[in-house]
Image (cartoon, helix red, strand yellow):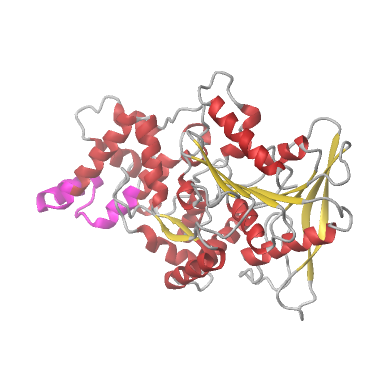
Amino acid sequence: MALRAAVLVNIALTALSTASAFSVSGRSVYVEGYFHQKLDHFNPENKEYFEQRYYELHKDYFRDGAPIFLLIGGEGRLDGILPNFVLQQARINNGLIFALEHRYYGKSFPESGFDGRPTYLSSEQALADIAYFIESHKELYPHSPWIVGGCSYAGNLATWMRLKYPHLVNGAIAGSAPVLAKMDFYEYFEVVGEVLKKQVPLCYQKLVEAKEEMTTLAGTSDGRKELARMFRTEEYDSWLADKFHRRLRNSLVDISDNVTIQYLPYYQSYTSVVCTSITENTHGKSVLEILINMLMHNETYNSLELITRDDITIGFRQLSDLDGDMWLYQCCNEFGYFPTLSSDRQPIGVTHDLNDWDEICQQWNITLEMVEENVRKTNLRYGGKTPNVTNVVFMHGSNDPWSTLGVLSDLSESARAFVFEGLSHCEPDRMREYFSKDDVRKPKWMQMFDEIESIIRGWF
């Protein structure tokens, strides 16, 4: 029970993006189909296949030789074609668009050989899926170049398709792609702190005040007695502070209207119950005591034991249990991506919560030492933040915690990076058609989009 709760919390923190249904307007039709996909691309003796879901969007103005854009699915079900920059480029260039669901997610789940451990789930197999899909369609469109695109983990896959299969893919659009695998992803909450500092400076200041008070009290005998009083226990132990910091972390990341800081829209101000409570009248109590009362002694969590079963999700796109387990497996087996509070450059409090992941990864007999080695191999395989690629555009939002693991400056004249000030995770992929007319940043954003579109046209 406790493990499932921890899994749910961390799924939400580490779930990068999923796709949702989209009604295509105008004279166009998108059709769901299933592709007969190889189960294991690297073992010629394995003759098994599975059915991989895809969507195909036909435009009546498609002309022979126009580009074909493949929208790559990420760590969740693909229920349609998300309105984003890739789809827009297909429209502008009279192209076709396909969307391919990732193996082991949604309806693309290979049943063969699955006994709780997804034997054939890896980024390498996913890239080979994409390559086999493209290769199988090239006979139908012999004169059309292929452009791949995706956001978040799918943005990684788009980048790595140009790296591993440049003969099949003319270019890649990588949105919010955390191409650097990292086990202790402490930078996540450093960016959360920066967003808080910009959006609600008084709240940030109060959080720092509470953090410093906790540190000071924990350093003396009398202070620990005071902390025990606040926590309503006989004696204070550091595990209480760890639980408190995790509850505070989760409450801060999840904000109003079921939106997270990770997905905070550029036009929406940050608001949360936590910030409201500590910036209004404190009735003589310290900020730390207010937060402890709020997070440790409320009606839902009225005992410390119940806190270990906290299943609050941190994100407005919650993965299903099975999709969540598959993504956690990928994190343990390839990427890490474990957001922690191990950095002092954030206002929440320093804890060694990396060990929390040991129990999660152990369900597949993967230790933290193995995770560290898996992360090393992933970066060796793909190049981390300096992949040896051409014809790739990287798009990031400056308020996106995942951007710290991405390419933020040009790698070369043909591998360009664009950082959109004030945008969050995957927002650059979706923003062009949804600007606020009076937004002062719009001209600069539009200038970057115009440049990106010019680069893409040079790929075909």
Q: How many marks on residues?
A: 0
Please tell me which residue lies in front, 262 or 318.
262
Q: Is residue 20 left or right of residue 303?
A: right
Residue 20: image quadrant is top right
The reply to whether residue 370 is visible in this rendering is: yes
Would you say the magenta stretch is mainly helix, strand or loop? helix
Which percent across, then down, holds residue 355?
Answer: 38, 63
Question: Which residues lie in the magenta part?
Answer: 216-245
Q: Is residue 280 left or right of residue 195?
A: left
Is 224 one of the magenta-colored residues?
yes
Which percent across, then down, holds residue 254?
Answer: 46, 40
Which percent across, then down, holds residue 282?
Answer: 25, 28
Query: Who's the residue at 55% across and 59% down the image?
Result: 387
Please determine whether, in this image, residue 438 is positioned above or below residue 446: above
Query: Who's the residue at 59% across and 29% down the image?
Result: 446
Q: Residue furthest top?
A: 438
Query: Who's the residue at 60% across and 57% down the image?
Result: 389
Which percent across, then down, holds residue 423?
Answer: 51, 35
Query: Who's the residue at 66% across and 70% down the image?
Result: 120
Please tell me which residue lies in front, 233 or 409.
409
Q: Is residue 394 left or right of residue 137?
A: left
Residue 395: image quadrant is top right
Is 153 one of the magenta-colored residues?
no
Q: Residue furthest front?
A: 413
Please determine whether, in this image, residue 151 is positioned above or below residue 371: above
The reply to whether residue 21 is visible in this rendering is: no
Q: Residue furthest bottom?
A: 45
